[in-house]
Amino acid sequence: MDPADLTASIDVEQPSQARIYDYLLGGSLNFAADREAARHLLAMVPDVPLVAQANRAFLRRAVRFLVDAGVRQFLDIGSGVPTRGNVHEIAREVAPESRVAYVDIDPVAVAHSRQILAGDDRTTAIQEDARRPRHILDHPDVRGLLDPTRPTAILLVSVLHFIADSDDPAGILSILRDAVAPGSYLALSHITSRHGPHGAAGRQSDAAAGAARARRHNERSDMFAKPRSRAAVERFFTGFELVEPGLVPVEQWRPESPGTVGKHQALMCMHAGVGRKTGLAEPLDRDAERPEH
């Protein structure tokens, strides 16, 4: 699909997080405004494509882990523009019966998803805002596809750092957590403001510092990630028990080639983890979720 086919129905002058990410991954479903925003970010943080690729690799590893753990249905929120190695493709390498609901706010991402998923009755793609979890959960396509009584994997990969504290990300996660059955999982990755051994306090990473500069100096600040501390990101797993190795720099989460891990300092700015819902949980602490400075 040529993104120009959708210019009549969307504002092509407004960049999109999904299309910026597509550009950083080498895709073609993006507009001039997306490329301009991406180039501005690249000027601040040259290693952003490396982080994007590592984040995509984490998604693949996490989905394989989840399938091996017995999960057969996935809610991929902020799924973005489809590329090789989509969630349903990875899951079905082992479990052909897997069901996937893709959710994104970007019309290009959703339209392209629907095009490639046409005729597949075990997938759906809806246009919805990650900040409106009840709308996602109550959408008839999602309700018709995913069985709430069976374990579901909630995927929030490279999403929450685009959601401001004022939009209550802790509350969003609380709603999603309470909607899925025990034995469900949460997989997420998030830009972090500090790094060190397992994300301990240390000097601010170059990538996170660059993202902060981009955010300060670009009028389209909502297009750029807002780093949080590792401790704040870990609190997003309230009600989920982190599986090994816990919340770690993205390339360190169950790497396929351990010998290559640690060669790129820029990847320390993105943390990732997977947690399993084991039962009832206390409400998330919204005040504690505030980022550390």
Image: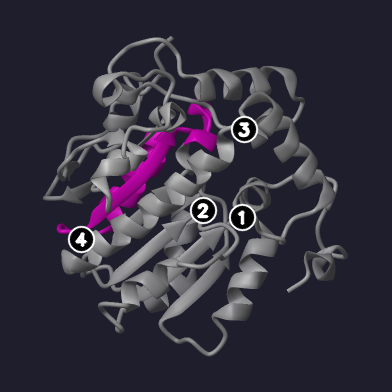
Name the residue carrying label 3.
224
* In this view, the mark in front (2 or 4): 2
Q: Is residue 261 visible in this depiction of the protein? A: yes
Distance between the alpha carbons at the discs numbered 3 and 1 = 16 Å
Distance between the alpha carbons at the discs numbered 2 and 4 = 21 Å
* In this view, the mark in front (3 or 1): 3
Say above or below: 185 vs 1.
Answer: above
Look at the image and give the residue range highlighted in magenta.
Answer: 161-190
Name the residue carrying label 1.
105
Q: Earlier in the sequence, mark 3 or mark 1?
A: 1
Are dots 1 and 2 in contact, CB under 8 Å? yes
Name the residue carrying label 4.
181
Counting from the top left corner in percent of width and height, residue 246 is at 20, 37
Name the residue carrying label 2.
78
Are dots 4 and 3 in contact, CB under 8 Å? no
Distance between the alpha carbons at the discs numbered 2 and 3 = 14 Å
Distance between the alpha carbons at the discs numbered 1 and 4 = 25 Å
Are dots 3 and 1 in contact, CB under 8 Å? no
* In this view, the mark in front (2 or 3): 3
* Amino acid type assigned to the residue bearing label 3 in the image: Phe
- Closer to the camera, 110 or 270? 270
Say above or below: 83 vs 145.
Answer: above
Q: Quadrant of the C terminus?
A: top left
Q: Earlier in the sequence, mark 1 or mark 4?
A: 1
Q: Is residue 179 part of the magenta span, yes or no?
A: yes
Q: Is residue 14 visible in this depiction of the protein? A: no
Element type where label 1 sits in the image: loop
Distance between the alpha carbons at the discs numbered 1 and 2 = 7 Å
10 Å crowding of disc 4: few (<14), some (14-19), many (20+) = some
Element type where label 2 sits in the image: loop
Element type where label 4 sits in the image: loop
* Amino acid type assigned to the residue bearing label 4 in the image: Ala
